[in-house]
Amino acid sequence: MASKKLPANLHRDTLAVRVALEPSQHGENSEALYLTSGFVQPDAETSARRFAHPEEGYTYGRTSNPTVTSFERRLAALEGTEAAIGASTGMGAILMMCMGLLKSGDHVICSRSMFGSTIALIGREFGKFGVETTFVSQTDVGEWKAALRPTTKLLFAETPTNPLTEVCDIAALASLAHSVGALLAVDNCFCSPALQRPVEFGADLIIHSGTKYLDGQGRVMAGAICGPSRLIVDVFGPIVRTAGMTLAPFNAWVVLKGLETLGIRMQAQSANALAVAQWLEKQPGVARVYYPGLASHPQHELAMRQQSGQGGAVVSFDLRGSTPEVARANAFHVINSTQVMSIATNLGDTKTIISHSATTSHGRLSEEQRQAAGIGQGLIRVAVGLDHIEDIKADLLRGLDTLA
């Protein structure tokens, strides 16, 4: 059944509920979930053609699936890119990107404030295969420029960062990358396309962990890369088919439906996060609050330009403590005193999540690496959800009011 042709220049909120494959002959209004490992071919000639040219039809689940295609098309429309490709997880998407772009002797420049697993994957695992990585300050464009080499193939940053919400100048980094023929990849996990579209500032590739805000309810694992067709189709497509980083159809369907409420969720969670951040700044036991929506944030003005005037939904804060041991004990006390928030390491959920970054998301880094990234033992990250704001404040006060 043919669907209506969508007009041009639709708002992102409309794209989030409309872009997908055409419905089947049954005319379903909610996109179909195709749970099958293989697809029957009408004849041998068609089978041969589709295996040689996967874009012409579906053959095997590791290669492609209609539900996954719907998710990819919708996400690409939201990010404003030519195409997107799904992956099993966000880290799977990063692995796919590195496998497609890098070889022995190539050089990568990466923010030292990246997610801990990203640092380990690029700096350690790809180092085994002769890829060199220089880690630089997230916010100092001069360090990025000084690190450029003739062999530099990729600049990679997430903005804002996890957990300190540092913001990089996407346009400036894109200019640097392109000056030496390299690509700029941006991890857009914290903002999602509802708040930030890196391609509008010159980024070449956008990385997503669909596990976070794209799904929005902590249900499934998913990842994706958005970018130009010449890379998505010709470079990363063969890697997915060969290496098997395939996004499961059910997971794709869950995230596809999650995208439909992405805009309204991000607005509500960002508003809650700003209120929490402003309130935390007034608490005597809090030494510092990290949130791009605060005027006190070092990159506040840049963040407001890049992030559609919103700060996102993640707030981190340092507790006062005379020593790292005391700071850690204080952090554990505040976390353990909560009765509403979930103690977990995920983010992007409708449920507010609290975590201790130094022992969870960045626990596998060395103390030297954590210190370089500014992650101390007194740091707490709160991924603000849709809980009522007064309940979030009261939950934090249970620990803040009883600190020794």
Image (spheres, rainbow, N blue to C red):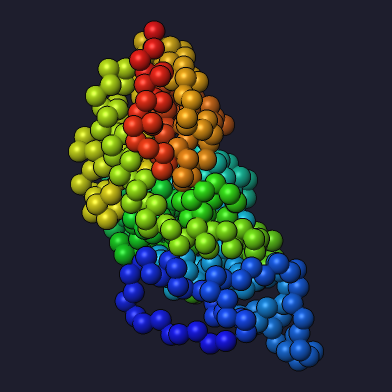
Does residue 269 show up?
yes
Residue 261 position in % (x across, y down): 43, 58
Camera-nearest residue between 323 and 292: 292
Quadrant containing the N terminus in the rendered view: bottom right
- Seen in the picture, residue 366 relative to 170 is either above or below; the reply is above
Task: Give the residue at x 59% y 63%.
Answer: 253
- Which quadrant of the view contains residue 237? bottom right
Residue 152: x and y, percent? 44, 56
Q: Which residue in the rendered view is the most extreme toward the top?
A: 404
Front in this rendered view, residue 250 or 114: 250
Residue 3 vs 361, above or below: the answer is: below
Count the marks.
Answer: 0
Give the quadrant of the C terminus.
top left
- Percent position of residue 323, x then y: 40, 11
Which residue appears at 77% of the width and 81% of the height?
40
- Identify which residue is drawn at 39% across, 12% down: 402
Q: Is residue 246 left or right of residue 196?
A: right
Residue drawn at (24%, 52%) of the image: 309
State whether residue 166 is above or below residue 372.
below
Residue 324 vertical position relative to residue 58 in the rendered view, above or below: above
Q: Residue furthest right?
A: 44
Q: Is residue 167 visible?
A: no
